[in-house]
Image (cartoon, rainbow, N blue to C red):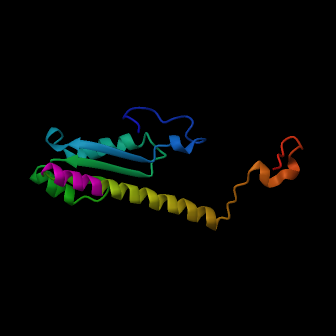
């Protein structure tokens, strides 16, 4: 979890758990009537997280014109029309499952790329000939 405006960790290339893999923006439509400006601002914010695999902007309580405009758009914008709490929770749960599924598909691509290119990760124990006797521990 990273708050907006914070910089990516300098350790993320060495410690994958520090990478920002998904960016989720939240918009209150009555406070932000211009969805085009919101989408532009969200896209610019996402550029700060180059390791992100999935970017979604959740817009809550759009008015009728925003619903019409948003439904014509493809991409990262997801509209949450006005509804009761349980309906909004269900809709949000569904959208978060879609984010998780998108992440899993990206991970699958990584695995398939590694398999097709024959990438083999070796540890020092895979090549014990290069180790001194003090480094090799036998059970």
Residue at the spot 17% in from the left edge and 44% down from the top edge: 29
76 and 40: which is toward the camera: 76
Magenta residues (range): 84-94
The part of the image, by quadrant, that contains residue 135 is top right
Q: Position of residue 18 (x, y in %)?
A: 51, 40
Residue at the spot 11% in from the left edge and 49% down from the top edge: 63
Query: Left or right: 117 with respect to 48?
Result: right
Q: Position of residue 1 (x, y in %)?
A: 41, 39
132 and 28: which is toward the camera: 132
Query: Left or right: 58 with respect to 65?
Result: right
Is 65 placed above or below 132 here?
A: below
Residue at the spot 55% in from the left edge and 45% down from the top edge: 16
Query: Left or right: 126 with respect to 66?
Result: right
Q: Is residue 90 magenta?
A: yes
37 and 129: which is toward the camera: 129
Residue at the spot 41% in from the left edge and 37% down from the top edge: 2
Q: Position of residue 123 (x, y in %)?
A: 74, 51
Q: Main secondary structure of the magenta part?
A: helix
């Amino acid at each position: 979890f990273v708050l907006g405006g914070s910089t990516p960790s300098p350790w993320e290339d060495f410690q994958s758990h520090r990478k920002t893999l998904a960016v989720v923006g939240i918009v209150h439509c009555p406070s932000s009537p211009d969805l085009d400006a919101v989408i532009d601002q969200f896209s610019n914010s996402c550029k700060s997280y180059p390791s992100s695999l999935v970017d979604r902007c959740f817009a809550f309580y759009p008015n009728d014109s925003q619903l019409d405009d948003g439904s014509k758009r493809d991409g990262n914008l997801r509209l949450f029309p006005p509804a009761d709490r349980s309906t909004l929770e269900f809709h949000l749960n569904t959208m978060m499952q879609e984010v998780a599924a998108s992440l899993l598909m990206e991970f699958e691509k990584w695995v398939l790329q590694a398999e097709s290119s024959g990438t083999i990760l070796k540890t020092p124990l895979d090549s014990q000939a290069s180790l001194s006797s003090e480094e090799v521990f036998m059970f």
